[in-house]
Amino acid sequence: MLWELRRRVLRGNSPTSNVEDPRDLDPTSLHFGGFLDDVLVVSASFFRSVSPVDPEATSYQLRYMATDFDAQGNGFGARVMSEARRALREVGAQELWANARDSALGFYQATGWTHIEGSEHLSPETQLPHTVIVLRLEEA
């Protein structure tokens, strides 16, 4: 289910796109999802990672946040993000960061993230514009 949602939403449903991350099964990784009936409609994966903003902080990188097209705009992503922040605080995370698609920056800003000036870049995987974003958990 997880990889199917990632592929459909983040990779244009391309059957040749790799949406598996070698860290998916790492015991320090955390995955969050939301279901309607038995269908996964939103997911977010967090991986222990050195922050590009504060390398001394205990940080997790958000990757593969995906909300099914029919479920977007209904608050599912915000609910998953809220639960993820709570759970990540519990495991000692101080900072979250991500390479966010520019098309999703409004969502991240609305949920408390800030973008890093001058960090704009093209994703090597998708060739879409991305920006580094960060969320300090003690401020969230």
Image (cartoon, rainbow, N blue to C red):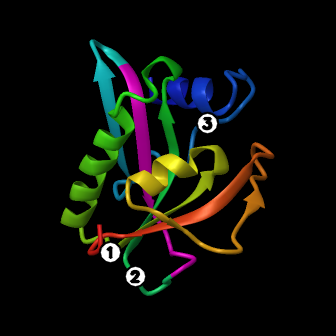
**Picture quadrant of residue 130:** bottom right
Alpha carbons under labels 1 and 3: distance apart = 27 Å
Residue at the disc numbered 2: 57
Q: Magenta residues?
A: 40-53
Report if the CB atoms under discs 2 and 1 are less than 8 Å apart: yes
Q: Earlier in the sequence, mark 1 or mark 3?
A: 3
Side (left or right) of 90 relative to 116? left
Q: How far from the left and from the top, in percent, is residue 128?
A: 76, 46
Q: Percent from the top left, x then y, of residue 109?
A: 47, 56
Q: Tell me: 49 left or right of 136.
A: right
Decide if residue 25 is in sight here. no
User: Where residue 121 appears, x then y in whole percent?
Assistant: 76, 61
Q: Nearer the viewer, mark 1 or mark 3?
A: 1
In this rendering, is residue 38 above or below 84? above
Q: Which residue is mark 3?
A: 19
Towards the viewer: 86 or 79:
79
> Pointer 1: what residue?
94
Q: Is residue 47 left or right of residue 6?
A: left
Q: Earlier in the sequence, mark 3 or mark 2?
A: 3
Taking the spot 41% from the left edge, 36% from the top edge, the residue there is 43
Q: Secondary structure at mark 3?
A: loop
- Identified at 69% across, 25% down, the residue is 12
Dot 2 amino acid type:
Ala
Q: Report how far apart the C-alphas of labels 2 and 1 lie in the structure.
A: 6 Å
Whether 131 is drawn above or below 70: the answer is below
Majority secondary structure of magenta residues: strand
